[in-house]
Amino acid sequence: MKRSLIIIIAFFSVLPLLIAQSPYRLTVEELFERGMQNSIAIQQSVIKAHISEDKLGLAKKKQLPDIYVSGLLGYVGTPTILDKDLSFLKHSEAPDWKQNYQISATQPIYQGGRISNGIEKARLEKEVAELGLQKDKAELKLWLIGKYLDLFNLYKSRDVYAQNIEEAKVRLKDIEKMKEQGMITTNDVLRSKLLLTNYELSYKETENDISLVSQQLNIVLGLDESLVLEPDMDLLASRTNTLPESDYIYQAYLQYPDLKMAERNIDIARSNLKLTKADYLPTLSLQASNTLARPIPNISPAQDLFLNAWGVSLNLSYHISALFDKKRNTNVARQQVSLQELAQLQQKQNIRTNVKSAYVKHQEALDRINALNESLVQAKENYRIVKNKYFNQLAILTDLLDANSVLLTAELQLTSAKTKAIYTYYQLQKVSGNL
């Protein structure tokens, strides 16, 4: 009974450590979801989008009347009347207090297009901010999948090293038996032990890299930094269908964020040109006001009474001095339009080159997988043959270790090629505006 109690206590003491050491299984869906929720860059873009939305609301409110309310309450000192030589004559009778309360409303009637073009500019800037958010999300997804695939590659590499360590241990035992039988020299034993040590060091370094990449992802995903992440090991089984290159270019022209932003920037530049021209047009507004004042200022001496007055007026104004700068300001605004149109053309050229590059690199990655699959089969067969020859004393240890090194390299290269193919696929989706 006492022994059972000790075992139970020990189990529950070790259980928290086992739970802490177990890796956290992270799927691609959760990777993107957590990234969007916790990324500081995405939060900044969301705030920018909200700011642009508020600016659009402010621009629309300029269509409404401008209401102004004012109030004044003050003490009036006793006026002093002086002679022509500034000598004192007398004090004039006047009220001691003054009050003035006014309310006025001004409704814009014609502003030369300032208000309507200002609203249109704010709407376009809001679209640019939303496209910026979309672009930042795509860039974050590509970064996340890159780190995720690094993690996947490290886990696969660790498995390869683990298999080679077990293979090296079995091979070392067989070599030690051959040494005891006097069939080989001590040098073969030492070299085999050295190779096993190198594999164990590589295994440990891979585990450290897994911890480092996990921490980088944990920071962005809002997880505990000490958590060790484990990717979906069935990721390579997912199918990635590739369309013709022309389809990706067509999709990019329709939905790539940078190209859409270039189009909106052209529209913004045209709105700025209209706003520049509006500065040289008159403005017309309707104003209604009501004033309650004390004392009555138009009577001398002033009477300590309230005077209520109201009125409606049409206000017309024209900024004549702006005419002197009209030519240069208009030219600057037109040049900004031309500059944004050139930026759009440049962006279209970039799309074609980026899609071409991503498409070719993805096809290269797929071709590399096929080639390395054949290389791996050949490396396994070569290792099997050399291993049999060595233990039949038909080959030296150097040949066996070289064959083992070739097999290890082939396994690692194939894993790297498979993960790179997935990454290039996501790159292709990003440059075509699908990520």
Image (spheres, rainbow, N blue to C red):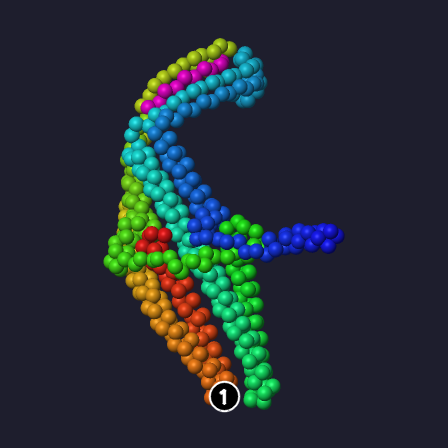
Note whether 272 is above or below 162 in the view shown: above
Q: Does the magenta stretch include residue 289?
A: yes
Q: Which residue sits at x=36%, y=27%?
A: 64
Q: How many marks do you count on the picture?
A: 1
Q: Which residue sits at x=38%, y=71%?
A: 372
The reply to whether residue 216 is in sight is: no
Q: Which residue sits at x=51%, y=72%?
A: 164
Image coords of residue 196 (percent x, y): 56, 76
Q: Which of 409 and 433 is in front in this view?
A: 409
Note whether 328 is above or below 359 in the view shown: above
Extreme residue in the front direction: 1
The reply to whether residue 99 is in sight is: yes
Q: Which of 352 and 359 is in front in this view?
A: 359
Q: What residue type is labelled 1?
A: Gln
Question: For mark 1, what is the residue?
Answer: 393
Image coords of residue 312 (percent x, y): 34, 19
Image coords of residue 392 (percent x, y): 49, 86
Q: Give the range drawn in magenta.
A: 286-295
Q: Is residue 151 left or right of residue 58?
A: right
Q: In this view, does 23 lie to the left or right of 410?
A: right
